[in-house]
Image (cartoon, rainbow, N blue to C red):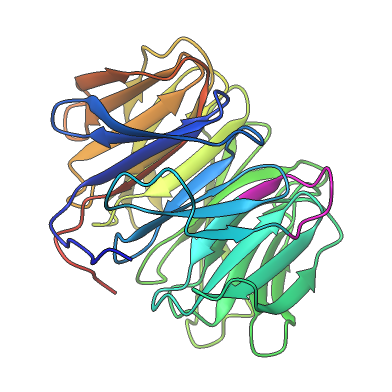
Amino acid sequence: MGQPDSSAVVLVTGGFDHCIKFWDAQHGTCIRTIPFAESHINRLCISPDKRFVVAVGSQNAKVFEVAGMNQNPCLLIENHKPGGNIMVAEFQREMKWIVLASEDGVIRIHDFPKTNNLRRTIENKSAINDLKIHPEQDMLITIDQKGFLKLINLRDNSIECQVQPEEGVPLRSVAVARDCSLLVVTNNKGRCFLYHWPEPRQRSRLELLTQIDAHTKYAIRCCLSRNLQYLATCSADTSAKIWKLDGPNVELVHVLMGHEGWVWDLAFSDDSEYLVTAASDQKLRVWKVSSGELSRTIEGHNKAIMSVALNDSVAMRK
């Protein structure tokens, strides 16, 4: 398997056209296409060392090497129930394991790279729409179709905290600050809820800082910039938005228009200066965070782009 290149910019997309595309981010050209024949692609995740990308779809996950031009996965995980779309995958920071969560309501943690070794399963009573590994790596943060945000302790699979921001409204996306100062979730009504841990050592209690009516339709994805100054959201209303964070205060600074269809996913650059958005119009758009100006449009897919993953960090960081 290839060695990591800490200076590489890894930009990867996938969607309804059953393929994964790697891009030259500077020139906007496709440098590699990998077929994903079994299904559309729900999510992509790049490993912390930039050596691998995992793509998840219906019932299975495939891990590909970033370096080289190999079309075949180096690892295959196919143990989810029929009809249970895998919605998200995350690498543990030291890459000792990988976690998958699905519409079948099951979280599966596999050893990595020996993915045939299923370390554990955790049952949820509802389809899981998104998941993050807590920055301290000892907890999972999940959101589900019944509208619950849960903090699951990996020592014993217990639920340390459970919150339902809006009764009966499915949650769509979750983001957590790398310093554990902020946790953000979005829902099907376009609302965004910002929480924090008032006492970081007692993580069983989350406190709501504020909520915002971010969008007029589904708020599909949210993410936080690495410098923790910005929150970005995107929606079925065809827009993405950039919000300035100042403690409990959230200020809308840019509404990013131009996509002709649902905006499914987004990602900040590591320096927090750019935001990449992916949409049903088959386009990636790159925006300047400071001004909200469109920097570049990237085209190459022939159906909706469901997921974009970007890792342009200069070196691995904790």
Please state the horizontal and vertical placement of residue 258, each as a whole percent of the image.
Answer: 36, 12
Instruction: Identify which residue is drawn at 37% across, 30% down.
Output: 277
Instruction: Identify which residue is drawn at 48% across, 34% down.
Output: 14
| 165 relative position to 277: left or right | right
On screen, residue 106 above or below 109 = above
Instruction: Identify which residue is drawn at 22% across, 52% down.
Output: 270
The quarter holding residue 158 reads bottom right
The answer to whether residue 148 of the structure is visible from this angle is yes
- On whether residue 170 falls in the magenta region, the answer is no
Please state the horizontal and vertical placement of residue 175, each as a whole percent of the image.
Answer: 48, 55
Please state the horizontal and vertical placement of residue 193, each as a whole percent of the image.
Answer: 56, 49
| 253 relative position to 112: left or right | left
Depth check: 171 or 215 in front? 171
The answer to whether residue 206 of the structure is visible from this angle is no
Residue segment shown in magenta:
79-87
On screen, residue 305 above or below 160 = above
Instruction: Identify which residue is drawn at 74% across, 56% down.
Output: 148
